[in-house]
Amino acid sequence: MSVLEQEEHGSDERAGRHKEPFWKRYIFSQDHKVIGIQYGFTALCFLLFGFSLMLLMRWQLAFPGKPIPVIGGLLGADNAPGGIMLPEFYNQLGAMHGTIMVFLAIVPLAVGAFGNYVVPLQIGAPDMAFPKLNMASYWVYFLGGVTMFASFFVPGGAANSGWTSYPPLSEIATQGQTWWLVGMVFLITSSLLGSVNFIVTIFHLRAKGLTLMRLPFFVWSQLVTAFLLLLAFPPLEAAGVFQLMDRVFGTSFFMPSGLVVSGEVVEVAGGGSPLLWQHLFWFLAHPEVYVLILPALGIVAEVIANNTRKPLWGYKSMVYAAVFLGFMSFIVWAHHMFLTGMGTTISAFFQTTTMIISIPSVVILTALLMSLWGASIRFTTPMLFALAFLPMFGIGGLTGLPLGLSGSDIHLHDTYYVIGHFHYVVAPGTIFAMFAGIYYWFPKITGRKMNDFLGKLHFYPSFVFINMIFMPMFLQGLAGVSRRLWDGGEQYSHAQGGLHWNEFMSWGAWLLLVAQLPFIFNLFWSIKKGKKVDSNPWQATTLEWAAAPSPPIGHGNFAEVPVVYRPAYEYSVPDHPGDYLAQNDPTETPTETPIETPDKTSGKEG
Amino acid sequence: MSGHTVEEIRSEMRRYWVVGTALFLLTVITVAVSYLDVSQGVAIAIALVIACLKGGLVAAVFMHLISEKQAIYSLLLLTVLFFIVLMLGPMGGRLGSTALG
Amino acid sequence: MKDFLARWMPIDTSEHGGALDSMNALVHWLMAVLFVGWGLYFIYVLLRFRAKKSPRASYSGSTSQVSTWIEGGVILVEVILLVGFAIPAWARWVTPPSPGDNPLVVRVIAQQFAWNIHYAGADGIFGHTDIHLINEASNPIGLDRGDASAADDIVTINQLHLPVNRPVTVLLSSKDVIHSFGLPVMRVKQDAIPGQEIPIHFTATMTTPTEARFPGCAADKECWEIACAQLCGLGHYRMRGFLTIHEPDEFENWLIAEAPEPVEAEPQPAGLDASTAEAEASDHADHADHADHADHAEHMRAAG
Amino acid sequence: MQIPYTVEERPDTGLYNAKLGVWLFLASEVMLFGALFSSYVLLRTGDPAFMTIPHAVAEALHLGEGAHRWPGELNVPLAFLNTLVLIFSSVTIVMSWASLRLKQFGKYRLWMGLTILCALGFMCIKAVEYNAKFSHGLFPATSNFLGIYFALTGLHALHVIGGVVVNGYLWGPGAKMWKTEPERFTNRVEVAGLYWHFVDLVWIFLFPSLYLL
Ligand code: HEA
Ligand code: HEA
Ligand code: CUA
Ligand SMILES: [Cu+2]
């Protein structure tokens, strides 16, 4: 029975459940599954919202200075008089697109939604270790989202200094920046609450026999992600407090002396350092980008193992690579700052760490590619997205290399090449992995499968259109076109050669929206009308499939506490009939014996 | 873990008072030293050494880190590592910088 | 090697740019090889191991060591790129030219949304500047004309004129927010950070063709430009300057032409010829009036 | 199905959930204060004027001729007193935990109550100190040193307030749990104590680096 059906019938045979009032079960719920769904739904709404902002911007980029049709008039005279987008509004949209996509859409979806829903199930836990904290984490995130959203309506509009909010620009910016900072403090707090919860849950609530090396790769990816959130986010919280004080109390932590803005000498004590912000920001934001990609890699690994019907190739090296990746991500941040006036030694250090960190990504990707060898590939909808992820992440990751070498970064820094680089990793990369995850775990959440035809109708056009948007960016970037240009570079001679791409890319973006319609329809339609399935429709091995389809709300996911007997992906085991052996399947195989006590593990982790 | 028997707990409690007193004395020393006329570098060194000593006592005894588990040591080791990176990184960025002023 | 990317990149007119471009091309070769190699494998595998053709998967999968070799190869190439190219290239990039090469030193002071270029003039000494003397219309960098060494200083707006084949050091700073001084045709880019003066060094190897010079080079011609690469506010998109590389004697003539009139009772706006004056007027008009961006945008497009 | 290890320790880590949780939280706090200290060091070493009291301020405070240096105008005796108050509160909270382990609930209440009083005392002294600064016209915007001073002590004060809330809860309404789940309650007090010691520990570093150097 699906969550939503339960909501309707309001009945649940399990003792005591019906006593909980509606708001306690579905609004201020402490159940990881409900919280996961809350996160997921909110994040999807923000994903759509962040996308819509970009659709507006893409109009301006395609047809600079032309009135936006239909919607243009609704944007308000302060933003788009006569439907023509003002540069300051463009900057707001850009800054908020970045912020919303990263902090309000992808992270909550990848960690909040998938992590919350799937991790406890995959480790055979009754719930997260701290259910109340879990609830708090969602609601603090929600507050952060509301703050960010509301900032569009304050005088001067939302933050407009880029998602990076570099001072002094952000310090002299309109009020929206203050809202942005407050929102960020909420979001960071939410992530901290969540990450503590994830780490304790994964270390402490694993089912009997589920040793660390038997964890599904998805759980590993969430564990490393949680450590990144835990240790990398606080510095931005500190920086946020400083910037807030600069803006509200007139301190000058990030304001050097002797600034002259619009002909007026700025009256502050001075002596601050704009670069301090950049250090603190990128100390967070580089690990943050791995927060965006690790859960995606986890999902892709799950889907690939399941749809190749064989164990992941090089599971161990993938785990070590992920841990190493997490560790290294703390010491590469200044590769975003090569052009702030860096000396040779420091630049050599950060170039080297950047090249080092590309290796674990290569290892993980290679392992996933090698997993395909000897497989029996089922091209299900989640698998299509997972497969597409590989070359797309490949393009994004590979284009990170010239950026990581400071010499080639001189020409490419702050151009569309960078935009192309990271969108390949986050859009056809992470977003595709998110789609794979949604199609894959939908039957677990609702007890029904999403429609396969509509899924394919979603996949193929999306794949084409998303490449239409991002591929030309590399060409524009090589030509040297700066990012964050209101007119897409129209005034610059060096941009002329690639200018015609702007319209092409915008069409890609608008068509991409159209390509999402089958998905949105499918998502809601399948809740009610999708094909009913049993608890393990994909014939998967991991523990979440041992729980009932659409596990009932309330702590306690499994009818019986599961015991684990084997590694995560025992597909196509030789001499075993059927092509998979679930982790909790007690069948004796020559190689595996049950482990009676929880393994000896340490908290050590990178 | 700390002791369980009544005797053990009582001796722990005595230890808390001893450490409390030590912290008190160290605080007095810090303040006293700050009135001495030593160079800035020496003053910073002394103050930080004493602060580390005090911090160490609090962590080791009050937070009973001395008898803590491997998991926590590993976690703290990792944190301390990143803490150091965080202290040095921004400074390092400037040391190598070509900027004037 | 460089040609690999050259078709998409602007021409390179600097001494150091070639090395950077080759390195960039080299990385792209590595990327291409990896992508095409894995891509072919990927397509092959998808065809060969689809469930229809390969109904039962192999438990052990691939036992080949090839992937390890590939990973090793990637590491090796990265090390070569780092040690052989990237680190030395950066060391050269930050090393100042030796005084013997008679480098030309120019100050560039960025502001919302224009590039102020400050030449030391005949005496080779930059005059004293003071933020309190700043007048956006007449003295954007606050040059103290009372200072003896300032008398011959030249200040232009959005017009960077440099001699060919002579090392140049640009002392880069900013009046207000962070900008980024980009010369796409020179493979130069450096953030201008308020509170700091950051030196960058390069040498032009080619003079600007006439049709690529300001004025007269419309946006659709191949102007040599200064592009602001860092978001610096609502006018970021139009913070465009012009770069003109002269023959040495031509450059000297330009300097003489630009030099301010000696002996003045009242400081005059320095270094303006008809064309720069126009550029200046339009840029500084924006500061005065932040409200009419739309108008301004129209204007810029018409002018640009 | 109950959530395991809320009371008993998991054999492989030797910890119960909340204890692992609070240490993780403290690890993130280390990074938070690490960033704050790092900023302090960077700003202080980056700006030669960082430690000089601006001329106008020195004049307003009648400091007389010559150069004046921070932390000159900070109140060392009060901060010294505050240090002692916090150290004492660290002793009392660990005593309250020990009392619970000795099953002496009354003593627990006493020690915990003292801890809360100390924390409130700390806040009062802090308020006096802040108030004196404000009345002399010393604000965060006055100079970056004061900005750092207010930012660091202010964030620390927020942590103290957080501690008061938690400890107050455990002293008052939360203490009901002693009747139903004494072990779990003892654990909660231990965890609250760990947090409180950390707040003390931060102050131990703040005090010399802001007031004495
Ligand atoms: C999910 C997010 C994500 C990921 C995973 C990465 C991964 C990497 N990034 Fe990226 N990056 C961003 C998000 C991300 N980045 C963002 C958001 C920005 C811009 C922020 C801003 O300025 O606004 C940025 C900017 C950025 C810069 C700064 C550029 C500049 O501003 O000038 C640099 C420089 O070093 C860099 C480097 C790298 C490197 C070396 C990797 C490596 O980890 C990549 C390693 C991966 C590989 C090497 C791929 C391996 C491929 C194969 C094995 C072939 C496979 C082929 C087939 C399947 C066919 N990134
Ligand atoms: C995770 C991060 C993320 C993601 C996913 C995206 C996704 C996209 N981004 Fe963005 N982008 C950034 C992060 C991201 N971006 C950042 C950090 C910047 C820099 C900002 C700055 O300069 O400061 C940036 C900047 C940026 C620019 C440059 C602007 C400029 O420099 O001026 C452009 C230009 O085209 C762009 C385009 C797009 C497009 C077309 C997508 C598309 O791929 C979006 C596709 C989205 C979908 C396909 C989602 C569909 C939604 C659903 C299916 C939900 C259904 C809903 C329900 C069921 C309720 N982005
Ligand atoms: Cu100046 Cu962008
Ligand atoms: Cu990065």
Image (spheres, helix red, strand yellow):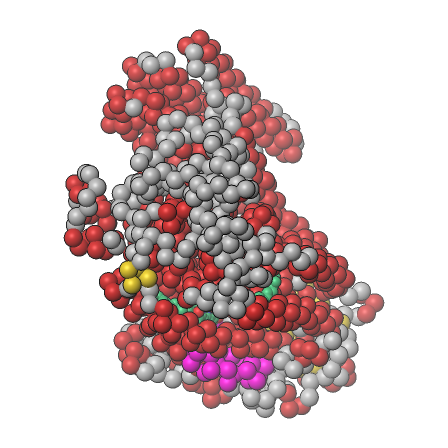
Q: Which residues are magenta?
A: A484-508
Identify the residue at image location x=49%, y=74%: A467
Ligand 1 found in image quarter: bottom right
Q: Can residue D189 be seen here?
A: no
The correct choice, above or below, for A166 with respect to D189 in the image is below
Q: Is residue C23 located in the magenta-colored stretch of the structure?
A: no
Of residues D137 and C22, which is closer to you in this image?
C22
Count of marks overlaid on the render: 0
Q: Can residue D104 be seen here?
A: yes
The quadrant where residue A584 appears: top left
The quadrant in which the N terminus of chain D is found is top left
Identify the residue at image location x=39%, y=53%: A114
Identify the residue at image location x=38%, y=66%: A50
Residue C135: give x, y in percent of width and height.
51, 70
Of residues A8 and A350, which is closer to you in this image?
A8
The correct choice, above or below, for B18 with respect to A85 in the image is above
Residue B100: give x, y in percent of width and height.
66, 57
Query: Is A557 placed left or right of C234 in the picture?
Result: left
Of residues D184 and C162, which is closer to you in this image?
D184
Residue C139: give x, y in percent of width and height.
55, 72
Identify the residue at image location x=68%, y=75%: C186
The correct choice, above or below, for D52 with respect to B6 in the image is below
Query: Is A471 placed left or right of D90 in the picture?
Result: right
